[in-house]
Amino acid sequence: MEPKVLRQELDAAESAIGLSALVQQMRGPWVRSSQLPDLFCSWDLAYRCTKGGWLKPIVQGKRRTIYRLADVLACMQRIEAGELPLPRRNKATQSDGA
């Protein structure tokens, strides 16, 4: 087996172990909006997924937004497959288009 392929398999195993540890800490089939950046390793990526319609909250209140863990994992699979949500627009490009 080539070292490059072996390294990719090790990286995948490490990320799966880290993900399973995060899922075990969730204590249920729901994810709070404050936990999304930890799961996606990026606040911006979590924001883009929600604004892009990839993630829809099951409960949305003034101080509480909750997502299904299965939806979050499906979104992560889309990202791992190479698909990315649309990037955020700059204020300068928004004002130029108007």
Image: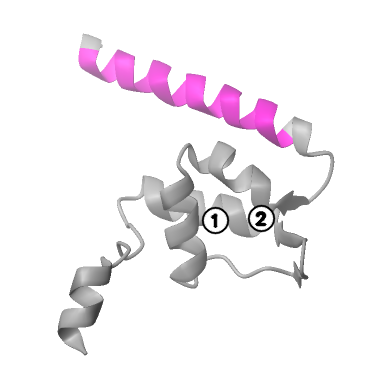
Front in this rendered view, residue 7 or 45: 45
Label 2 environment density (alpha carbons within 10 Å; few <14, some 14–19, many ≥20): few
Residue annotated with mark 2: 70
Name the quarter where the N terminus is drawn. top left
33 inside magenta stretch: no
For the residues labelled 1 and 2, say whether their Cβ atoms are less than 8 Å apart. Answer: yes
The C terminus appears in which quarter of the rendering?
Answer: bottom left
Judged left or right of residue 58, residue 72 is left
Residue lying furthest bottom:
98
The correct choice, above or below, for 37 with respect to 1 in the image is below
Residue pictured at 59% horizontal, 47% vertical: 36
Which element carries disc 2, helix, strand or loop?
helix
Is residue 8 visible in this depiction of the protein? yes
As shown in the figure, which amino acid type bears the numbered disc 1? Ala
Dominant SS in magenta = helix
Residue 74 image label: 1
Does 19 sit left or right of 82 as displayed? right
